[in-house]
Image (tube, rainbow, N blue to C red):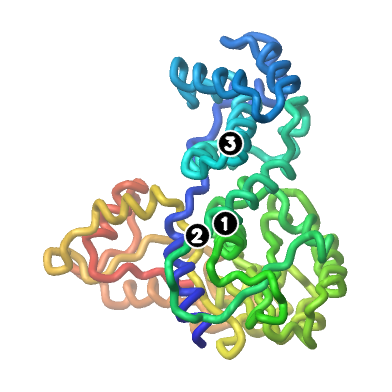
Amino acid sequence: MRFYKCVIIPLLSQLSASFDGQSDPATEEFAARIWDDPDCLTGRGLDWASIRQTLQRAPANDHRLAALVEQLSTTIGWDDIIEDCLFGGVALLYWRTRQLLELGHLEAALLHFSLLDSYASSFHPAIMARGTWGVSDWDLTVLRRDIAARNTPSDALPDCGKVYVYTEEEAPSLAYLTQGAAFCGKGQWGSEVHIHYWLLSSPYRTFDPAQADYFFVPGYGICMFEGGFLNLTEINDIYTALIGELPHWQEGGRRHVFTFASGMAVGVFKDWERYIPNATVLTPETGIFNDNRWQKKPFFEPWRDVAIPGHLHRSEIMYFLQVARPLEDRRYLAVFFGRVDPSRASHVASTALDDAPRQALFEMMRQYGPMGDVLFGSNLTVQQMRSTMGDSVFCLVPR
């Protein structure tokens, strides 16, 4: 229990503040330029062929690289650089961040990496591989981990036990399950990425398995599936192979912790009951996934698993803080905004409302009619919805 009080609870605040680079969708013209001309050879404001040569020829500590980045960022600005050439701008940020880190300028490296992560989250890693910028998804992963390793808080903290984090060096299959951290770090599923990297920089991390109270197994399973990296059969096979590679594995996964942050939960690993029935799963989804008729009960077990909130982008957190009115001045007792279509109805294997709280709410409102201090659904914009939630004592968020 002390692990959850001291490690998991502080972790949740980190998840809510993590920066994942969510942005407005790209225009069709911008997307076409990225796909058709990833090296930015035609129709650009900057001479990207010369910039690419500078990146390829200059050693990482070359002062010319620093001067080039400084000149471009101060005279043009990063948003305009990225607009002109997405992958070229990402490559510039990568090499400058790597340079700052190797020179020992951690705060400056963190600032540059926040920009790099923001822009890198906007595209699938496979698209950048079409260009010749010399920066791969693995390069970004190594940089991210180097920064995490050097960013461990030094303040004295309570004794909460120790967590050992598995890496690809001892479990090679992890490389397939932890691709595209920037791309996968968005939305609810992003918690799988941010938990991983929070633990990599956590003061509770230990490199000595003999000291570990828990063993963390990273993986972005749902993003690997939904992002087109792997299909479900491949994910199942990789997790199965992974279990055999973990050197400190215990029967059924005791003292091992996984993250599965989608509606599929641990079901993204089809054979989980055979291989990890006793492992702890961190998940925001405690109900039954609607599409699986064969599933009769939730994957979530209170004695074994931990319910966590899904990842929220920092901008969402800040907006809610801005619109939150004093409790005594709020107009509504409760509000609910959400879908009540068949995808959020009773589970396909059920005929009752006991596992369909959204439908039950809708039925309650139908029976009792309008309530002045309860607002259920409306054709509001996202901004209006959030402002109304800040004007309510309770916000209903049923499964």
Q: Kindly indicate whether the residue at mark 2 contacts the one at mark 3 (C-beta within 8 angstroms).
A: no
For disc 3, the marked residue is: 97
Q: Is residue 88 above or below residue 335?
A: above
Does the image show residue 189?
A: no
Q: Residues within 10 Å of mark 2 (few under 14, many from 20)?
A: many
Q: In this orientation, which residue lies closer to the viewer: 347 or 331?
A: 331
Q: Is residue 98 above or below residue 244?
A: above
Distance from label 2 to label 1 (Cα)? 6 Å
Q: Kindly indicate whether the residue at mark 1 contacts the one at mark 3 (C-beta within 8 angstroms).
A: no
Q: Secondary structure at mark 3?
A: helix
Q: Secondary structure at mark 1?
A: helix
Q: In this orientation, which residue lies closer to the viewer: 33 or 351?
A: 33
For disc 2, the marked residue is: 311
Q: Secondary structure at mark 2?
A: loop
Distance from label 3 to label 1 (Cα)? 23 Å
Label 2 or label 1, whichever comes before in sequence order: 1
